[in-house]
Structure formats: C-alpha cells, structure tokens
Image: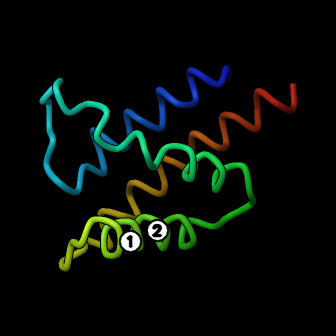
Amino acid sequence: MEKKDLISNVRSVLLNDWDPVGIGDNLNLSDEYDGYIGSIINILKQSLSIEEIVSLLEKIEKIEMGIDSVDVKKLYDVATKLKSIKDSLMVVVCK
C-alpha cells in the first residue's frame, strides 16, 4: 500500500465511520480530520491493540474536540476498521 493510499483509507474511515462532529457528506469540510491522520498512522505502525486505538480516539474527542459524550462502542468499530488498514499494510510490507 502506498502512502497516499494509506492516508486516503484512514481519511475515509475518519469521515465515514468516526465523524464525531457530524460532517457527513459536506465536501467543503472533507479535510476536517486531516490533522489527526498523522498521529493515527503513527499509532497504526506500532503494535497497538484495539483498546489503545480506542483510547487515542476517545482522547481526541474529549480533550482536543471538547466532546463530553463519547460513544465508546462506536469507537471500537472505528478502531477495528483502522486496525484492518494496518493489517493490510503489514501484508504489503511483508511481501
């Protein structure tokens, strides 16, 4: 997987699955979560569990976005999708 594909895949999960501020399909705001892509990719490069990814997403929502009510179950679903991106990245790297 090329870097641009990795970024695109993470961006897609953030916009379509995570979307804590409700951007939806608003193309004018499609870069709203781009500031988090780098830290998420860095975490995906490490051997982190789903729980650790959830913890990062929860921290971003609570501390950086100021969201009081975090849907932790949804974060597990998002973390699972992000981890699957990592797993597909590892398959490409190992070939």
Q: Nearer the viewer, residue 74 or 23?
A: 23
Q: Residue at x 25, y 74 (%)?
A: 70
Which disc, if any, is residue 58?
Answer: 1
- Give the image quarter of residue 65: bottom left
Q: Residues within 10 Å of mark 2 (few under 14, many from 20)?
A: many
Classify residue 4 as left or right of residue 12: right
Quadrant in which the N terminus appears: top right
Residue 40: percent from the left, percent from the top?
A: 55, 51
Q: Is residue 83 above or below residue 68?
A: above
Q: How many marks?
A: 2
Residue 2: percent from the left, percent from the top?
A: 67, 20
Q: Nearer the viewer, residue 52 or 77?
A: 52
Q: Please report contact status of discs 1 and 2: CB closer than 8 Å, yes or no.
A: yes
Query: Which element carries disc 2, helix, strand or loop?
Result: helix
Disc 2 marks which amino acid? Val
Q: Is residue 58 above or below residue 4?
A: below
Q: Nearer the viewer, residue 52 or 38?
A: 38
Q: Residue at x 87, y 24 (%)?
A: 95
Q: Residue at x 57, y 21 (%)?
A: 4
Classify residue 16 as left or right of residue 59: left
Q: Is residue 19 above or below residue 79?
A: above
The alpha-carbon separation of the residues under discs 1 and 2 comes to: 6 Å
Disc 1 marks which amino acid? Glu
Query: Which element carries disc 1, helix, strand or loop?
Result: helix
Kindly identify which residue carries mark 2.
54
